[in-house]
Image (tube, rainbow, N blue to C red):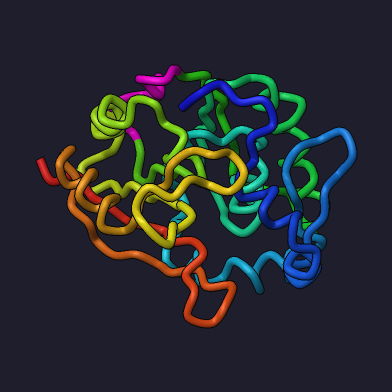
Amino acid sequence: MEKRTINFCLIILWLLSGTMLQAQKMHMVKGYCGIYYYSIEDLLRQKQAELDFISFQPGQTVASIGAQCGHWEAAFAAVTDSIHFYLEDIDTTYFNSRQVSFAWHYYDSIRGKPITSRYTMITGTTASTMLPAGMFDKIFIINSFHEFTEKEKMLADIRLRLKPGGILYIDESVPRKSGQKHGVCKMPMLTPDEMKTLLEANGFTFLQALDINFRVNRTYRKIYAFRISW
């Protein structure tokens, strides 16, 4: 994944559509990166299908690779209990304790009771997450996989970090055709078939996927779930 300046591809696309942003009940906060739900009710209304698909369980250890602002992980922390999140990124421009602490405290303030899920921050490299080995029930890559410059090395690294039976979730925008570049960050995206082929060639088995549809008959995002196969 390349060093980024302000490369929030999915966030910017949301912001480019004011009606979509308004419908999702989200806003930006001056001085901090990311977008935030106004209330827990808004969060659950938008994210419930994803939460059901992921099925967090108390006591799990979860990593997010390419966490950057930490705002999606903080949102998950607001509606889970007793999860230990490991947040990883290579670019400390936005991935820093001030930003992540803000995201956590923001959701703590609207949750109505203290967040019981905690986080640890780790700075990785383009070829290694630097996460503890064999520790994770779930690993997320949210809107970052298309930016990885060393995908095969990263997938090999991720295999070392998952527990037996652990699941890798990759949340990505879906291109209309092979080779299409992301509209904002200009990095090539993978079609669903390309995603599955790449992961299967690197030791993962496809389990299932959740389609995120913002328009009728148009899958805008897809969350893929994979398990280690060898």
Q: Quadrant of the C terminus?
A: top left
- 130 in the magenta segment: yes
Q: Please give left or right for residue 211 compared with residue 202 in the image.
A: right
- Residue 139, image x, y percentages: 39, 42
Q: Please give left or right for residue 31 compared with residue 206 in the image.
A: right
Residue sitting nearer the eye, 211 or 76: 211
Residue drawn at the location 43% of the way across and 42% of the way down: 188
- 42 in the magenta segment: no
Q: Residue furthest bottom?
A: 216
- Residue 158, image x, y percentages: 30, 32
Q: Is residue 185 above or below residue 213?
A: above
Q: Is residue 63 visible?
A: no
Q: Please give left or right for residue 69 compared with residue 230 in the image.
A: right
- Residue 40, image x, y percentages: 73, 64
Q: Which region shows up in magenta?
A: 125-135
Residue sitting nearer the eye, 21 or 190: 190
Residue drawn at the location 17% of the way across and 47% of the way down: 200
Quadrant assignment, res 140: top left
- Residue 174, image x, y percentages: 44, 58
Characterize the magenta stretch by its predominant secondary structure.
loop
The total number of labels drawn is: 0
Q: Residue furthest left?
A: 230
Residue drawn at the location 23% of the way across and 44% of the way down: 198
Q: Is residue 178 visible?
A: yes
